[in-house]
């Protein structure tokens, strides 16, 4: 029996897709526990229970495989945030929901956060971006900017430069998460409350 394929004659078979997912999962596990430099193709193959040649059959290089792992993590992150925003009642509530969702996802998915920081940040303590602007993968802060713009258009937010404020709020979220990763005793729920208050003070209409 020929393995079934997805849509299109050149699409991978379901077996191939399952194998690719297995390799991505192994990559996420290794990066989150060993770090990016120690995650070799040989280590991934061993974790997945396949040969290194099998890894290279599906992903031609470590870079391609780790990029696929990062893309998956970021896509899941975005889906979680979007699901939270759907339940928000109005532009102001959507911005609060965004802040809470950004913290909530990372609190519940520490492994995935490690992948993001390992892939996007340099090794000098995780403070410098490998590539400027790479923190905005999948339009994270552009998405927040759209929410802020909607709030301004609805008349519930003050006038401000949307890009600057979106980057400031995003940077505050990243800073709290970075501290939490290094100091897990931080009360992240309390920190999320402070970030919510910080955001509302930054964007609210002033008397």
Image: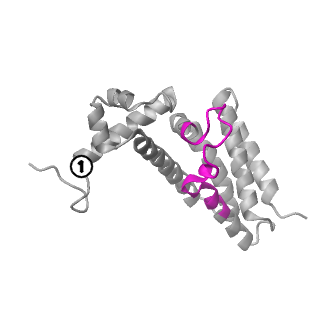
Q: Measuring 67% from the left and 69% from the top, which residue is drawn there?
A: 150
Q: Position of residue 55 (x, y in %)?
A: 31, 37
Closer to us: 22 or 76 = 22
Q: Left of 80 or right of it: where is 178?
A: right
Closer to us: 42 or 159 = 42
Q: Is residue 154 above or below residue 142?
A: below
Few, some or many residues within 10 Å of mark 1 (<14, 14–19, 20+) = few
- Magenta stretch: residue 135 in it? yes
Q: Position of residue 178 (x, y in %)?
A: 66, 36
Q: Left of 184 or right of it: where is 20?
A: left
Q: Position of residue 115 (x, y in %)?
A: 52, 38
- Magenta stretch: residue 71 in it? no
- Look at the image and give the residue range highlighted in magenta: 118-145
Q: Measuring 30% from the left and 32% from the top, which residue is drawn there?
A: 52
Toward which corner of the image does residue 40 lie, by quadrant?
top left
Closer to us: 52 or 146 = 52
Q: Left of 100 or right of it: where is 58?
A: left
């Amino acid at each position: 029996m020929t393995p079934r394929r997805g849509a299109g004659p050149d699409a991978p078979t379901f077996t191939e897709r399952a194998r690719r997912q297995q390799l991505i999962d192994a990559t996420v596990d290794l990066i989150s526990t060993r770090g990016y430099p120690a995650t070799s193709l040989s280590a991934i193959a061993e974790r997945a229970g396949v040969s290194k040649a099998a890894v290279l059959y599906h992903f031609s290089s470590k870079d391609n495989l780790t990029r696929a792992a990062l893309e998956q993590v970021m896509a899941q992150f975005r889906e979680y945030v979007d699901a939270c925003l759907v339940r928000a009642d109005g532009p102001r509530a959507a911005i609060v929901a965004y802040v809470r969702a950004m913290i909530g996802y990372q609190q519940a998915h520490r492994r995935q956060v490690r992948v993001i920081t390992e892939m996007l940040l340099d090794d000098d303590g995780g403070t410098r971006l490998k590539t400027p602007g790479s923190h905005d993968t999948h339009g994270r802060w552009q998405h927040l900017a759209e929410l802020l713009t909607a709030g301004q258009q609805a008349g519930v937010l003050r006038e401000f430069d949307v890009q600057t404020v979106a980057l400031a709020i995003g940077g505050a979220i990243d800073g709290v998460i970075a501290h939490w990763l290094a100091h897990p005793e931080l009360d992240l729920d309390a920190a999320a409350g402070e970030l919510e208050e910080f955001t509302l003070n930054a964007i609210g209409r002033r008397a």
